[in-house]
Image (spheres, coloured by chain):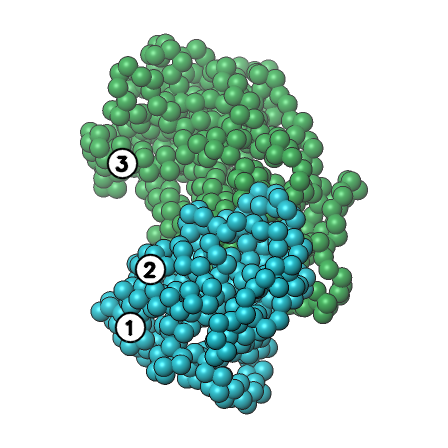
């Protein structure tokens, strides 16, 4: 609890002192009296957040007049050309809440998304592996029986989203917009007061260089009226702006994989209704979740300790499948035993995990709806990434704004990470639109503070809630905390209006 | 605002200059109060500090743009052939000439200059083609010019003359506008000379403005002498407005709320107060009825000198009330 409290209650620095401290960070660039190429918005990072911002700025008449640039280290041409057949899915999948979807619709990017690769789900089953208490989320209490069940969220591959955003940006024309891919920001400095030109001493100047030998048409120096850091957890933009970030590592890994499933039994009603499943496994360090993808596929997100993650990654496909099926069905002691089983030396012997699972399943009573059995794992899709919590001390500084992971990284158990980023982008785009129609300087701190005010508490609240859940569901055994959290879950399950309130919060 | 720091050094040297100017203004029966002038010049260094005493003005500024847009939606002066003389294209959507009286450090003037876009084919929300900003304090005008350089777009407007800062009083501007016309228009000979020698000559249309703005100025105008008071000030403002144009302003009304907020709380000692003592004089605050009376009076005086009495007056009073409400909510 201590680190969370520390991130919420920071030593208070009054706003005037904060701005007084800023000039110290900015060194003067000694070289180049030449005027750099001037852009209104320079976005560093071409992930969903950066591209989302660019697409949003292009979609509004006022902000489409701004001269914008995006800098990305990777080759975005590859992202544009990304293509997979309908039986294969990328393992980097996000769940988009209805508010993220409506934002993407508003900026015209949703139409560019390959809808056949996106999967909506209408229900969510969450249960505690330790106590068995269960909660289900769907909108049935708020929709009449005569209309379709409302979507809880939509599963989309990040590559599909990135490709859609890129094609939305291309569709807006190439006037006032430059995308420099294969380009690295080698340094960010403050500009100089040009004797015959404008005084750029408070403007960030980016020095760009091509990544490796790849082609890049970027100018070598560009000035940014507003520099947006959409450059991830180790944001160089955040470092330039000297914005501190607070947080901790969870010492957990998220194991992801693309899975194929057996037919749902019994057949869901109405036909086509999809369900997401999440089971908390307190003894193994976090929840395991199975989120639906089209054509009876699903994506796995299993938050567990680093050792367990390494073990899972090292398993043969058959054993891995058995472990995933076990994770949704077996009790904690069985799972812990299977997690420690000797790995078969050669793959031709009968899979021990599989036989262990079928034997143990006969002795485990099953209750409540179970996810369909996993039948296959896509080759090369098993991967693990470390889970962390980070929150920047502020999102804005004169001529700098942070969005997405550069501003906050949270536990993925509620699938909110990308949605928070989309929320940031929507808010920043709205702020810049207001500025552009009111004669404001888009990089001015007075403009940007509206964005920070709108997003900071929202993100802290959701990030904090995910952190709290993570901690609550990491207490193993049947002690008072396990009893309390199960009671809480049962109470919420039986109070539709509390559940509705929570769902609306999660919806964003 | 790191860029403001160097201007602090200019402050002591500019002070004698300032006093000289004040004397000059008093001789010329300016409506500028000497106390107000020195007070605001001393505030100069913090003018653009987003957390400084002018923070409320910065926060209010977007609302001024909304207000202007709502006024323009009700009508603008017709584009005349004289527009061609000033180098504007016929058919350009953004043709309005702005004058900002009492621009101070340029908070509003600069934001308006940012909306000037000669390349734009569609109308901008201010429809601005050019802006001239006046302030009697040389220190503040210098601050404004220095700050304008930090934005390349505004700096470019300043360089090519679509945006001008003038360090002079309204009265000086009126007399220079009426005596000299930069581009003599063909209609000039037909202008009748002023009716009486004591009154200043009328202002040729080329020197008039489509929109004259007066934001948080009227409450700082001297109201002591019969020759310099809000009425004479408003008369001069109105003479600069083209027929069908707008005089748009905002001020604080003299209410119990404004007394508590502006005098008791805002000027309280640190850390409660946000503005230095003496920034506002509650007794000088203007209520909507008073303002309406002054404007009526000014319009009548102006009518004697050829100001078209149409529009403006009613909308101005209305606008005052509108801004007053918003002003209170910001505090």
Q: Nearer the viewer, mark 1 or mark 3?
A: 1
Residue B162: tell me if it is visible: no
Residue situated in front as seen by the camera: A422 or A465: A422
Q: Which chain: cyan? A: B
Residue situated in front as seen by the camera: B203 or A493: B203
Q: Nearer the viewer, mark 3 or mark 2?
A: 2
Q: Which secondary structure lies at badge 1?
A: helix
Residue under label 1, please give it. B265
Q: Are marks 2 and 1 in contact (CB under 8 Å)?
A: no
Task: Report the disc number at residue B20.
Answer: none
Q: Are marks 1 and 3 in contact (CB under 8 Å)?
A: no
Give how far across and how far down residue B51 sits, in percent. 44, 67
Q: Which secondary structure lies at badge 3?
A: helix
Residue B284: tell me if it is visible: yes
Give how far across and how far down residue A380 sits, in percent. 61, 26
Q: Which chain: green? A: A
Task: Specify whether disc 3 shares its chain with disc 2.
Answer: no
Task: Specify whether disc 2 shares its chain with disc 1.
Answer: yes
Q: Residue at x 31, y 17 (%)?
A: A147
The Cα atoms of the two marked residues, 3 and 2, are separated by 46 Å
The Cα atoms of the two marked residues, 1 and 3, are separated by 40 Å
For mark 2, name the chain: B
Residue under label 3, please give it. A501
Q: Is residue A481 above or below residue B311?
A: above
Q: Is residue A391 above or below residue A179?
A: below
Q: Residue at x 62, y 67 (%)?
A: B181
Residue under label 2, please give it. B317
Q: Residue at x 65, y 42 (%)?
A: A177
Q: Is residue A294 above or below residue A131?
A: above
Q: Which secondary structure lies at badge 2?
A: helix
Give how far across and how far down residue A424 sits, in percent. 47, 45
């Amino acid at each position: 609890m201590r680190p969370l409290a520390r991130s919420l209650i920071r030593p208070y620095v009054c706003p005037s002192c904060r701005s007084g401290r800023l000039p110290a960070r900015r060194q003067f660039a000694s070289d180049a009296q030449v005027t750099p190429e001037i852009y209104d918005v320079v976005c560093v990072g071409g992930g969903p957040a950066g591209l989302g911002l660019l697409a949003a700025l292009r979609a509004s008449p006022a902000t489409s007049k701004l001269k914008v640039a995006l800098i990305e280290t990777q080759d975005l041409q590859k992202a544009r050309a990304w293509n997979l057949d309908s039986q294969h899915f990328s393992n980097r999948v996000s769940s988009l809440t209805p508010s993220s979807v409506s934002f993407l619709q508003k900026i015209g990017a949703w139409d560019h998304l390959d809808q056949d690769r996106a999967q909506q789900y209408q229900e969510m089953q969450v249960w505690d592996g330790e106590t068995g208490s269960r909660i289900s989320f769907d909108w049935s209490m708020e929709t009449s029986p005569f209309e379709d069940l409302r979507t809880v969220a939509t599963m989309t591959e990040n590559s599909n989203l990135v490709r859609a955003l890129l094609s939305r940006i291309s569709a807006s024309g190439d006037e006032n917009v430059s995308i420099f891919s294969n380009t690295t920001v080698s340094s960010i400095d403050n500009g100089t007061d040009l004797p015959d030109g404008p005084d750029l001493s408070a403007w960030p100047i980016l020095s760009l260089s091509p990544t490796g030998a790849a082609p890049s048409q970027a100018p070598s120096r560009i000035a940014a009226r507003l520099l947006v850091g959409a450059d991830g957890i180790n944001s160089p933009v955040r470092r330039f702006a000297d914005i501190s970030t607070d947080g901790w590592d969870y010492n957990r890994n998220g194991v992801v994989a693309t899975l194929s499933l057996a037919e749902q039994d019994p057949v869901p009603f109405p036909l086509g209704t999809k369900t997401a499943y999440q089971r908390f496994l307190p003894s193994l360090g976090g929840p395991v979740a199975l989120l639906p993808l089209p054509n009876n596929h699903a994506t796995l997100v299993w938050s567990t300790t680093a050792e367990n993650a390494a073990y899972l990654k090292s398993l043969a496909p058959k054993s891995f499948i058995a472990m995933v099926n076990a994770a949704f069905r077996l009790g904690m002691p069985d799972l812990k035993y299977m997690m420690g089983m000797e790995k078969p030396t050669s793959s031709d012997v009968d899979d021990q995990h599989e036989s262990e699972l079928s034997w143990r399943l006969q002795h485990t009573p099953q209750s409540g709806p179970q996810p369909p059995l996993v039948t296959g794992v896509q080759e090369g899709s098993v991967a693990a990434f470390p889970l962390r919590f980070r929150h920047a001390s502020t999102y804005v500084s004169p001529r700098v704004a942070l969005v997405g992971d550069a501003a906050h990284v949270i536990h993925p158990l509620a699938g909110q990470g990308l949605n928070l980023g989309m929320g940031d982008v929507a808010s920043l785009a709205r702020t810049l639109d207001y500025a552009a129609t009111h004669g404001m300087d888009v990089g001015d701190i007075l403009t940007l503070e509206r964005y920070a005010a709108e997003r900071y508490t929202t993100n802290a609240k959701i990030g904090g809630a995910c952190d709290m859940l993570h901690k609550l569901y990491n207490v193993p055994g049947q002690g008072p905390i396990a009893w309390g959290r199960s009671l809480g879950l049962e109470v919420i399950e039986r109070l539709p209006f509390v559940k509705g309130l929570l769902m609306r919060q999660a919806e964003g | 605002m790191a860029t403001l720091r160097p201007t602090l050094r200019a402050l002591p040297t500019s002070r004698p200059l300032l006093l000289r100017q004040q004397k000059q203004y008093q001789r010329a029966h300016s409506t500028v109060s000497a106390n107000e002038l020195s007070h605001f010049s001393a505030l100069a260094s913090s003018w653009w500090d987003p957390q400084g005493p002018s923070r409320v003005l910065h926060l209010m500024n977007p609302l001024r743009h909304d207000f202007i847009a709502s006024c323009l939606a009700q009508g603008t002066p017709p584009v005349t052939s004289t527009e061609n003389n000033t180098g504007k294209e016929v058919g350009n959507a953004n043709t309005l000439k702005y004058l900002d009286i009492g621009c101070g450090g340029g908070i509003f003037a600069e934001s308006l200059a940012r909306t000037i876009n000669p390349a734009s084919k569609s109308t901008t929300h201010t429809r601005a083609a050019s802006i001239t900003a006046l302030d009697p304090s040389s220190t503040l005008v210098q601050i404004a010019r220095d700050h304008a350089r930090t934005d390349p777009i505004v700096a470019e407007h300043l360089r090519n003359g679509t945006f001008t800062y003038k360090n002079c009083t309204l009265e000086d501007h009126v007399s220079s506008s009426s005596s000299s016309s930069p581009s003599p228009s063909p209609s000039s000979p037909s202008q009748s000379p002023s009716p009486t020698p004591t009154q200043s000559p009328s202002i040729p249309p080329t020197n008039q403005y489509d929109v004259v703005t007066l934001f948080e100025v009227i409450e700082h105008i001297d109201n002591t002498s019969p020759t310099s008071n809000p009425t004479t000030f408003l008369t001069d403002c109105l003479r600069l407005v083209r027929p069908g144009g707008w005089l748009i302003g905002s001020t604080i009304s003299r209410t119990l709320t404004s007394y508590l907020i502006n005098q008791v709380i805002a000027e309280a000692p640190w850390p409660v107060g946000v503005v230095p003592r003496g920034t506002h004089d509650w007794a000088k605050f203007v209520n909507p009825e008073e303002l309406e009376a002054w404007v009526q009076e000014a319009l009548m005086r102006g009518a004697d000198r050829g100001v078209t009495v149409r529009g403006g007056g009613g909308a101005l009073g209305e606008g005052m009330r509108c801004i007053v409400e918003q002003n209170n909510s910001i505090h």
